[in-house]
Amino acid sequence: MGPVRTQKHSKSHGQHSSYPQTNTKAKRKHTETDLNALPGVQKIKAAIRQTRRLLAKDKLAADVRVTTERKLKSLEADLAKAEESRKERAMATRYHAIKFFERKKITRKINQANKKLSEADGSSSSKEKLEEELFSLRVDLNYILHYPKAKKYISLFPPEIRNGQTFASAVTSSSETDAERAEIRRWIREQMEKGVLSKEPELEHASEGRVPKTKIGPWDKKKSGSKEMEVEEQFGSDKDDFFEDDGDGDDDS
């Protein structure tokens, strides 16, 4: 009986000791899946090279050539999509922390503006000013949530401010960057006015706990108008007091 019990104990011990090994393999497999989510790009490129080599042959039946040319166009379209997707993932990872910081600050400002508006009992002009301020902040939030995915993120505020320095000590950003930021904000504003983007993005984001899946067309700089500087002036006044003490004691760093 002794040897039997020893064998069972050994078997049981082996089962328990296998759990960490199984989890390790699962984690490694998951990690490999994340890291190798993009080899599709290389596979598509290999398929394109093979297809082009086939088309380079002189003696190729007409029907085969037509089919192969169609396949090549399809592969090239797939490659463009795959590379765009890869770029989007890279940008999302690169600017996640900055967007999180700015979204948190903007959301708090929206809540404060909402509270001021609900408590306002003054003239209609003061309420109108609060409503304009609230809408401006909501444009900012949609800017963060729906910024062109494959484009380098242009922060709403300089890094000096994010690091706790005063606005006066911040380095002035280039006029080109300011203009491009204004263009994208104007585009966001237009999408909100058309009803494509929510006019209360803080509610959507709070209910879903993530970036709302809104079908919005791609931002095209060529289609942007010439009102970027006008928009920049309209919203630029919000920068000075944006990072003043919110009064809630929350540390965003």
Image (spheres, rainbow, N blue to C red):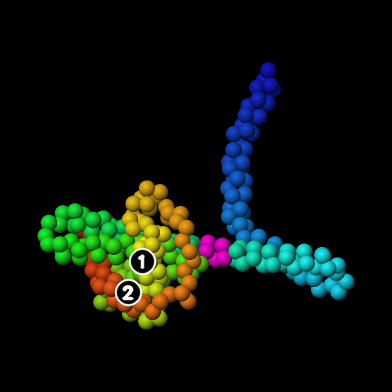
Q: Is residue 197 left or right of residue 74?
A: left
Q: Is residue 168 left or right of residue 13?
A: left
Image mark for residue 54: none
How far across and how far down the image is residue 165, in percent?
28, 71
Tell me where residue 69 sits by quadrant: bottom right
Q: Work out whether 22 lies above or below 110.
A: above
* 79 in magenta: no
How far across and how far down the image is residue 109, in percent?
26, 60
Dot 2 or dot 1: first in sequence order is 1
User: Which residue, as the protein is rendered here, is positioned at the far left?
Assistant: 122
Q: Which of 67 and 180 is in front in this view?
A: 67
Q: Nearer the viewer, residue 201 or 250?
A: 201
Residue depicted at 39% across the width and 74% down the height:
183
Mark-to-mark CA distance, 2 and 1: 10 Å
Q: Which of 33 and 92 is in front in this view?
A: 92
The residue identified by callout 2 is: 231
For badge 1, the amino acid type reads Arg
Circle 2 SS class:
helix
Q: Give the range drawn in magenta.
A: 84-90
How far across and how far down the image is residue 175, in percent?
37, 81
User: Which residue, as the protein is rendered here, is positioned at the far top?
Assistant: 1
Q: Do the residues labelled 2 and 1 touch (CB within 8 Å)?
A: yes
How far across and how far down the image is residue 82, in percent?
61, 63
Q: Which of 73 and 84 is in front in this view?
A: 73
The residue identified by callout 1 is: 189
Q: Is residue 97 left or right of residue 7?
A: left
Residue count near mark 1 (Cα–Cα under 10 Å), binned few <14, some 14–19, many ≥20: many
